[in-house]
């Protein structure tokens, strides 16, 4: 079977009726299912939709007509034409197991409470940290030593004016990458907000040329093992804390907002983006998935399928598209 094959509704429905997963697996070729949405009776659409959500591989729907809503919604990602499919399949081919794990995660956590969904995200991330795709990337890209930012002062500059708390990421020399020092400083500041209800407003921003390029790649591979990494995230993940007071938070972002640089802000009540802001989720090319809360925060802003598109393609989106989708609330 070639990657270009589009399965028909009737072919898939026949497999769905006998609950046969067919040849669809991240371990097979191609490591995804691609089908064309077609008009169908409601009962048939419900059967196929339920079956699609159980498949252990990415499901791509070509919806160039008006397919039945349950079937289109059951797909992991939707393309409007053939040209939109190619960037999706490139990402899946590069990291098929990470792609499948990511999309299974989005399906499973779509309706979970935030705290539970973050727990599941961390477990999925730990699974992939122990996987061959991440190890292969790390073998080539592991840094000799962590980066050493040269900025004066603490990683987070904290100022307060009565009921307003301002938090500024202060590692411009490292593009405000979220390293262990930055992560712990964010967690400490967020615990302060949780403890002090007199803080009515929290404003988060970043100093320097960009808001944040996300996780510090020079620290990748430094965790003792994947299981320990999960426990560390359970104790110190800033997103878990931010989600508890998100209604009080406004984030101002500019230029690069990559990985955790948008995963964390997406929890906030309000995001104001500069016109030069852009957003990207590149983790799949590392054999990983968003692990700073992005599989929870971003789908709750833009939906599961658009989040899947961002991760599978790794493409940047600009501030205008981010505003149209609801990833940000205002351009300033």
Image: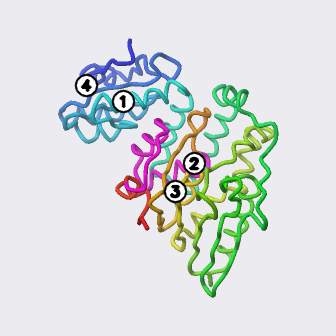
State how far apart marks 2 and 4 are (Cα). Answer: 36 Å
State how far apart marks 3 and 2 are (Cα). Answer: 22 Å
Of the image marks 2 and 4, the number of the one nearer the N terminus: 4
Q: Residue furthest bottom?
A: 162
Tell me residue 215's x, y (percent): 66, 48
Label 1, on which residue?
85
On the image, which quarter does residue 82 sit in? Answer: top left
Q: Nearer the viewer, mark 4 or mark 1?
A: 1
- Is 126 situated left or right of 83 in this image? right
Quadrant in which the N terminus is drawn: top left
- Secondary structure of residue under mark 1: loop
Of the image marks 1 and 2, the number of the one nearer the N terminus: 1
Of the image marks 3 and 1, the number of the one nearer the N terminus: 1
Between residues 243 and 40, which one lies in front from this camera angle? 243
State how far apart marks 1 and 2 are (Cα). Answer: 23 Å
Label 2, on which residue?
259
Q: Which label was assigned to residue 9?
A: 4
Q: Is residue 324 above or below residue 217?
A: below
Of the image marks 4 and 1, the number of the one nearer the N terminus: 4
Q: Which label was assigned to residue 113?
A: 3
């Amino acid at each position: 079977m070639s990657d270009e094959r589009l399965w028909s509704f009737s072919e898939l429905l026949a497999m769905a009726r006998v609950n046969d997963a067919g040849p669809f697996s991240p371990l097979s070729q191609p490591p995804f299912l691609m089908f064309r949405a077609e008009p169908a009776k409601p009962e048939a659409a419900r059967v196929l939709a339920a079956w699609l959500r159980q498949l252990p591989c990415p499901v791509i729907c070509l919806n160039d007509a008006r397919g039945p809503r349950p079937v289109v919604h059951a797909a992991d990602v939707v393309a409007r034409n053939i040209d939109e499919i190619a960037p999706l399949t490139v990402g899946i081919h590069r990291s098929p197991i990470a792609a499948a794990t990511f999309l299974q995660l989005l399906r499973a956590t779509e309706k979970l409470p935030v705290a539970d969904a973050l727990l599941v995200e961390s477990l999925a991330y730990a699974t992939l940290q122990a996987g061959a795709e991440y190890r292969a990337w790390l073998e080539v890209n592991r840094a000799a030593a962590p980066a050493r930012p040269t900025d004066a002062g603490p990683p987070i500059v904290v100022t307060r004016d009565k009921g307003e708390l301002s938090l500024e990421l202060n590692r411009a020399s490292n593009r405000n990458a979220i390293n262990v020092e930055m992560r712990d400083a964010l967690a400490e500041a967020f615990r302060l907000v949780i403890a002090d209800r007199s803080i009515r407003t929290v404003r988060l921003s970043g100093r320097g040329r960009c808001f944040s390029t996300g996780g510090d790649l020079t620290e990748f591979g430094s965790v003792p093992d994947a299981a320990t990494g999960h426990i560390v995230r359970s104790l110190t993940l800033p997103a878990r804390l931010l989600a508890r007071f998100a209604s009080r938070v406004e984030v101002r972002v500019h230029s690069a907002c990559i990985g955790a640089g948008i995963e964390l802000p997406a929890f906030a009540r309000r995001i104001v983006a500069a016109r030069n802001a852009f957003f990207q989720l590149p983790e799949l090319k590392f054999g990983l998935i968003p692990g700073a809360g992005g599989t929870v925060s971003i789908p709750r802003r833009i939906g599961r399928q658009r989040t899947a598109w961002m991760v599978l393609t790794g493409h940047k989106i600009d501030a205008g598209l981010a505003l149209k989708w609801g990833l940000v609330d205002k351009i300033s």
